Amino acid sequence: MTSTGFTEKSLFKKLKDYFPDLEKAEGTFDSFDCYTETHKTIIELKCRGSHYPELLIEKVKWDKLAEIRASQGLGTLYICSTPIGVWAWNLEAINEPEWSEKRLPKSTEFGSVEWVTKIVGYLHIDKAQPIQFE
């Protein structure tokens, strides 16, 4: 199966092949999307409609995941799909990206038309583990 057309819901379902005990985060506005108790890891999922060799992560997301990792001793994965593949970054094993300001929609989940300045960095797919689905 190709990754074209993944939604966070369908990506979550496919990831259960890798993490059978994968569970969704309980709160609507949690700082991560799901977790695996067996691997003691929290996971943030993103599905991009276009492919780029570097994929965006917001600094507030990076910082919150790092805070949870430090306070609870959990692993942190950032998993992102694009039309040509799925990549997983182990955030504690990579260097923090360089940050810059970028004008982006306030929220992509709720169809926001309001633009705001966000601090973002980019994770290169060469630093990620590709995930192959059968």
Image (tube, helix red, strand yellow):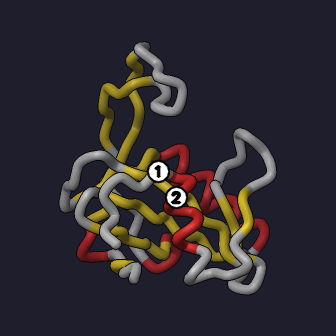
Q: Answer above or below: position of 25 versus 60.
A: below
The secondary structure type at the circle numbered 1 is: loop
What is the total number of numbered labels drawn onto the structure image?
Answer: 2
Amino acid carrying label 1: it is Thr
Q: Residue sitting at 31 percent across and 41 percent down?
A: 100
Q: Position of residue 94 (x, y in %)?
A: 41, 75
The secondary structure type at the circle numbered 2 is: helix
Q: Give the quarter of the figure containing the N terminus.
A: bottom left
Q: Tell me whether circle 1 and circle 2 mark residues in contact (CB < 8 Å).
A: yes
Q: Residue sitting at 73 percent across and 66 percent down?
A: 23
Question: Label 2: which residue?
Answer: 10
| 55 relative to 119 in the view: left or right | left
| 127 relative to 71 in the view: left or right | left
Extreme top residue here?
114
Q: Position of residue 14 (x, y in %)?
A: 52, 71
Q: Position of residue 69 (x, y in %)?
A: 67, 68
Q: CA distance from mark 1 to mark 2?
A: 5 Å
Q: Nearer the viewer, residue 115 or 24?
A: 24
Q: Nearer the viewer, residue 130 or 116?
A: 130
Q: Position of residue 123 (x, y in %)?
A: 32, 62
In the drawing, what numbered circle is on residue 7? Answer: 1
Q: Nearer the viewer, residue 27 or 71?
A: 27
Q: Residue sitting at 41 percent across and 14 percent down?
A: 113
Q: Give the quarter of the figure containing the C terminus.
A: bottom left
Q: Answer above or below: position of 46 versus 1.
A: above
Q: Residue sitting at 41 percent across and 32 percent down?
A: 118
